[in-house]
Image (spheres, grey):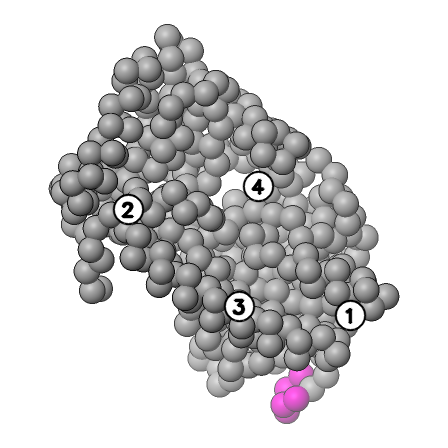
Amino acid sequence: MFWPGYVPIFGSGQCRLTERSEASLNATVHRSMNEIDPALWRAYFGESDPFLRWDFLHGLESTGCTTSQSGWQPAHIQLDRSGSTLGFVPAYVKGHSYGEYVFDWSWAEAWQRMGLEYYPKLVTAVPFTPATGQRLWHDAAHHNALSDVVYGVQALCSSLAVSSWHVLFLERAQSDELVDLGMPQRLTTQFHWFNRGYRDFEDFLARFNSRKRKNLRRERDQIARQGLVLETKKGGDITPENWRFFHRCYQTTYAKRSGHGGYLTDAFFTEACPTLGETPVMVLASCAGEPVAAALFFEGGDTLYGRYWGCLAEFDYLHFEACYYRGIEYCINAGLSRFDPGAQGEHKIQRGFEPVLTYSNHWIVDERFSDAVAQFAAQECDHVRAYQQEATTLLPFKLDSP
């Protein structure tokens, strides 16, 4: 699929940045994951985060999801000093704001009103994936390494001719560090499930107040009454036919919601995902022996991530069963600590998903806009924190202190 905001291809290469210490800082921009040794990538980012794995990002790229034509041009930044790597920043030069889940369309409009171009911009994120994780690696053995990495990326922005740099869905500790380095913080709210040592799903339901517990049981009972049968598969047990069917489901969801076939290609599901080992988890629903719906999750570390869903026919409460309740059961059975079912969705609260804050940081090249963006972000953070606190009061159980 081609999106508005085509990003012109620029070459990979190295450049020497302005010195601010005795040894110069050199930047290399990698236009493809193929230019990066998978073993080195694993050394920097590990493999516990399924979306930061080399093979996941390479799969997005090799199947046409992250390209200059799609408006997600890979521009992974390696920063070296005195022959050793100081930092590494996964990044993309973007010609639009689709697939990010941290919305800045109003910023682009403000640039346009001033007769300026907001795109292209530089984004450090996992494409199409609003899941929190590590976003910048720096060598902690070097004094001020993170500061130097941030400086290096900002200096490089001029060479890339971008308007801004956005670091999305990073861990809070690193986000707070970026605030100290002059990158204003934005907040959003998601709804996550936490495993508090539950023996099974009924043990989880025991925390609910009586009325909410009854409602949730009624929703689950409706699944069998509609003749639906659900099955959970993992990794190598997911067949090529399952992957092809899932892509149909994925396209159906996007066609209904957005009028297009989605950001991810058929090849991503049928060719890239089967190479991810035991990371993918798929819930398949059938009726009268025919597949009718599917939900896709990814497991990493102590967390299950719910990502995509689709249904070829309408069934009451099937979305909740396939996307939420089966995910909770999987976490309990696998001993996982957390279930991140994806962005948005206040309806998750009454089903036991707790409001949590997510973090992003932003740097604007043009100083005429940077103060306004910082002020906007501060005001927005106040509103988001107030919303999270209010949403917490709507949970179907009393939230214990951590």
Q: Which residue is mark 4?
A: 59
Q: Which residues are magenta?
A: 20-26
How far, Cα to Cα, is label 3 from label 4? 35 Å
> What is the secondary structure assignment of the residue under circle 4?
helix
* Residue 394 location (% of width, % of height): 30, 52
The residue most toward the right is 115
Label 4 amino acid?
A: Gly
Judge the density around disc 4: few (<14), some (14-19), many (≥20) Cα neighbours within 10 Å: many
Q: Is residue 325 above or below residue 46?
A: above
* Residue 295 location (% of width, % of height): 42, 31
The residue most toward the bottom is 22
Q: Are marks 3 and 1 in contact (CB under 8 Å)?
A: no
Which quarter of the figure is the C terminus placed in? bottom left
Q: Quadrant of residue 59?
A: top right
Tell me what residue is drawn at x 63 percent, y 90 percent. 21
How far, Cα to Cα, is label 3 from label 1? 31 Å
> What is the secondary structure assignment of the residue under circle 2?
loop
Q: Which residue is mark 1?
A: 159
Q: Which residue is mark 3?
A: 380
How far, Cα to Cα, is label 1 from label 2? 47 Å
Looking at the image, is mark 3 or mark 1 nearer the viewer?
3
Per the picture, the main secondary structure of the magenta-coloured stretch is: loop
Label 1 amino acid?
A: Ser
